[in-house]
Image: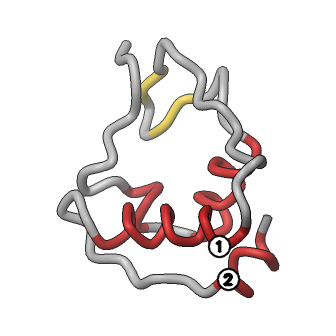
């Protein structure tokens, strides 16, 4: 059991944008990621402005050895 899921080369970060947007917006707890159960829940960041959340998502998707495409604010709004 780990404490936090890794961001580096993460299938969640590099995968379906809707999944990542939902996790950022609503948080995550009591779920396994890639078969691993983590100790700490991920808090919801629904207090962020859409522009801020989109910037964070784009940063994570293009750093930490991730090579996913960036998203627009409209994509974020449509999937949250």
Q: Nearer the viewer, residue 16 or 59?
A: 59
Examine the rendered structure and indicate whether residue 34 appears above or below residue 58: above
Give me the residue at 39% from left, 34% from top: 5
| Mark-to-mark CA distance, 1 and 2 | 6 Å
Residue of label 2:
73
Q: Horizontally, is 38 left or right of 78 in the view?
A: left
Instruction: Give percent across and percent down for residue 23.
Output: 65, 48
Q: Position of residue 29 (x, y in %)?
A: 66, 25
Name the quadrant of the C terminus. Answer: bottom right
Q: Are marks 1 and 2 in contact (CB under 8 Å)?
A: yes
Q: Mark 1 points at which residue?
A: 51
Hey, which residue is sitting farthest left in the picture? Answer: 65
Left/right of residue 35 with respect to residue 9 in the rendered view = right
> How would you rate the neighbour count of disc 1 (Cα within 10 Å): few for under 14, some for 14-19, many for 20 or more?
some
Relative to the observer, which residue lies in front, 33 or 8? 8
In this rendering, the answer to whether 35 lies above or below 51 is above
Above or below — where is 22 with respect to 36?
below
Give the quarter of the image for residue 67: bottom left
User: Observer-nearest residue: 25 or 49?
Assistant: 49
Decide: is 19 above or below 5. Answer: below
Could you say whether the residue bearing mark 2 is in a helix, strand or loop?
helix
Instruction: Give the number of marks.
Output: 2
Q: Which residue is drawn at the image coordinates 45% and 72% (left, top)?
A: 58
Q: Where is residue 79 in the image (x, y as percent from the top left)?
A: 77, 72
């Amino acid at each position: 059991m780990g404490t936090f899921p890794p961001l580096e080369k993460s299938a969640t970060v590099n995968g379906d944008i809707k999944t990542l947007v939902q996790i950022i917006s609503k948080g995550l707890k009591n779920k396994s990621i890639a078969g691993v159960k983590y100790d700490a829940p991920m808090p919801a960041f629904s207090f962020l402005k859409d522009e801020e959340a989109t910037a964070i998502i784009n940063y994570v998707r293009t750093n930490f050895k991730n090579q996913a495409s960036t998203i627009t604010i409209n994509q974020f709004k449509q999937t949250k």
